[in-house]
């Protein structure tokens, strides 16, 4: 007599494996997407802070928010826009505060100069040092605090405390889930 598994036993085992996979794969995929978004934010934040500090150093100034390069609208073109034109979604949802969604984001940014970072994030910065950062352009989910952030540069050229969503994420070791 040969020992082995019957076809029924193998099929039951495969069914159990399939159910376990169906339950775990979506959560792994979601965790991966959050990690990707967090990494994109981290890259864009570092690149913009470095560009601001570099611009301030080249101007020999003491306050980036009052710098001539911001007033001229030349900051994005000279220090950031390295890989093409910006691309923002046509509308964004605001899910962190429960506010209504807003569209035509550019209406809120007066005298902004816009561009795209090396990392592929779209950014618009106004003459006062405040602006918007979309870490993945027109791709979803297009929600404020998830892939769209209001940014503000500090006196030192680094992104400052202007936006509470961004600061929560930075303080939470770049974990978008903790910021919610």
Image: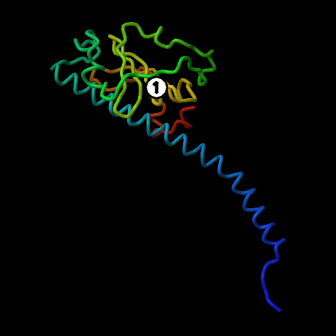
The percent coordinates of residue 70 (x first, y second) are 28, 13
Please name whichever residue, 88 or 169, is drawn nearer the observer in this view of the structure.
88
Coordinates of residue 60 in the picture (x, y in percent): 15, 20
Question: Image point 56% across, 25% down: which residue?
Answer: 143
**Quarter-wise, where is residue 80 in the image?**
top left
> Where, quadrant-wise, is the C terminus in this rendering?
top right
| Residue carrying label 1 | 134
Residue 168 coordinates in the image, percent (x, y): 48, 31
Front-most of residues 153 and 90: 90
**Dot 1, how many residues are within 10 Å of its Cα: few (below 14), some (14-19), or many (20+)?**
many
Q: Residue at x 53, y 33 (%)?
A: 179
Residue 122 falls left or right of residue 158: right
Q: Is residue 155 above or below residue 32?
A: above
Report helix, strand or loop for mark 1. Answer: strand
Quarter of the image for residue 123 reads top left
The image shows residue 105 at horizontal and vertical percentages of: 50, 14
Q: Residue at x 45, y 40 (%)?
A: 173
Residue visible at 22% across and 23% down? 55
In the picture, the quarter occupied by the N terminus is bottom right
């Amino acid at each position: 007599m040969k020992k082995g598994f019957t076809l029924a036993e193998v099929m039951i085992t495969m069914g159990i494996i399939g159910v376990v996979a169906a339950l775990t794969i979506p959560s792994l995929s979601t965790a991966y997407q959050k990690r990707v978004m967090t990494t994109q934010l981290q890259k864009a934040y570092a690149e913009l802070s470095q560009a601001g500090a570099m611009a301030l150093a080249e101007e020999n100034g003491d306050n980036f928010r009052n710098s001539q390069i911001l007033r001229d609208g030349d900051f994005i073109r000279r220090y950031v826009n390295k890989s093409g034109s910006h691309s923002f979604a046509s509308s964004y949802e605001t899910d962190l505060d429960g506010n209504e969604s807003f569209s035509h984001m550019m209406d809120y940014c007066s005298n902004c100069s816009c561009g795209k970072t090396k990392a592929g994030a779209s950014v618009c910065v106004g003459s006062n040092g405040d602006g918007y950062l979309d870490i993945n352009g027109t791709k979803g989910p297009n929600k404020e605090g998830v892939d769209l952030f209001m940014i503000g540069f500090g006196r030192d050229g680094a992104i400052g405390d202007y936006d509470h969503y961004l600061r929560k994420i930075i303080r939470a070791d770049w974990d978008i889930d903790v910021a919610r």
